């Protein structure tokens, strides 16, 4: 997914909502480091989340991995991600981004599923523009998803093949007061690796924690 598209959708549909403010404005303090690494666990400082690596084959990075743009991501969108988890041997990866919600934005399960599904439609359209209208794509429906410490979340994915490489491209969009949450992943199948199971372990380890 061209992540810029996903973030733009969320911005238009959520931060642009009119009405009475429901929360105080939250600003990102970019003077703070993104977070700290202790062993296989990353703990956010700028935003309150934790996540763990599934195996030594995976690495944390707060810098944009060099191969990401080659996978179809746009640099301006990538720059918004706080953290990347990557398998250098396969280029499978996961991006994590927490963004303060607008003061008037209101969330429920329907809103979360709607934005998740709209992102799906945009991705399918881009893939067909890139590879032809008959490009075979297998996709899922938006479904509620459970993440530790997250109030509402939904998950969706597509599967396709480019140049003989099977790809699974999925995302979780969610909300937990006062943040919108974006987790976007790509699994590139490679013999000897089971990166989809590793992605699931990463998502299972993810947690938004209460600020002390």
Image (cartoon, rainbow, N blue to C red):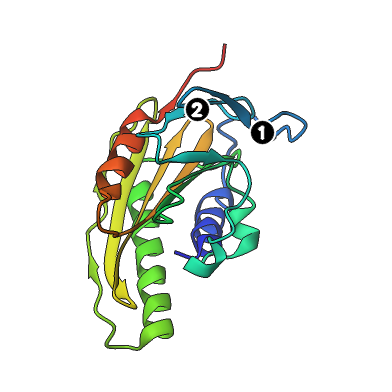
Q: Give the answer, above or below, for where 208 lies relative to 157.
A: above
In terms of image quadrants, where is residue 102?
top right
Q: Nearer the viewer, residue 191 or 42?
A: 191
Q: Give the answer, above or below, for where 199 lies relative to 34.
A: below
Q: Secondary structure at mark 2?
A: strand
Residue of label 2: 49
Q: Secondary structure at mark 1?
A: loop
Q: Is residue 118 left or right of residue 194?
A: right
> Which residue is depicted at the point 26% across and 65% down?
159
Q: Give the residue at the far top of this rendering.
A: 212
The N terminus: image quadrant: bottom left
Choose the circle earlier in sequence order: 1 or 2: 1
Q: Position of residue 109 (x, y in %)?
A: 32, 42
Q: Nearer the viewer, residue 177 or 55?
A: 55
> Which residue is depicted at the point 46% across and 51% down?
88
Disc 1 packing (10 Å; few <14; some 14–19; many ≥20) = few
Q: Nearer the viewer, residue 78 or 195?
A: 195
Q: Position of residue 3 (x, y in %)?
A: 51, 60
- Residue 106 shows in this picture: no
């Amino acid at each position: 997914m061209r992540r810029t598209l996903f973030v733009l959708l969320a911005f238009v549909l959520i931060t642009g909502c009119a009405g009475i403010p429901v929360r105080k404005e939250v600003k990102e303090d970019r003077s703070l480091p993104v977070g700290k690494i202790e062993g296989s666990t990353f703990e956010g400082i700028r935003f309150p989340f934790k996540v763990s690596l599934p195996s030594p084959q995976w690495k944390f990075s707060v810098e944009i991995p060099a191969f990401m743009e080659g996978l179809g991501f746009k640099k301006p969108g990538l720059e918004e991600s706080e953290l990347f988890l990557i398998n250098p041997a396969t280029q499978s990866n996961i991006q994590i981004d927490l963004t303060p919600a607008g003061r008037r934005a209101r969330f429920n399960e329907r809103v979360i599923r709607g934005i998740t599904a709209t992102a799906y439609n945009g991705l399918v359209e881009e893939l067909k523009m890139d590879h032809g209208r008959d490009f075979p794509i297998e996709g899922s429906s938006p479904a509620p998803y459970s993440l530790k410490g997250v109030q509402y979340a939904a998950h969706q994915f597509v599967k396709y093949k480019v140049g003989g490489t099977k790809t699974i491209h999925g995302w979780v969009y969610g909300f937990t007061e006062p943040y919108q949450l974006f987790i976007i992943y790509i699994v590139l199948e490679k013999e000897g690796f089971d990166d989809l199971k590793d992605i699931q372990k990463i998502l299972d380890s993810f947690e938004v924690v209460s600020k002390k």
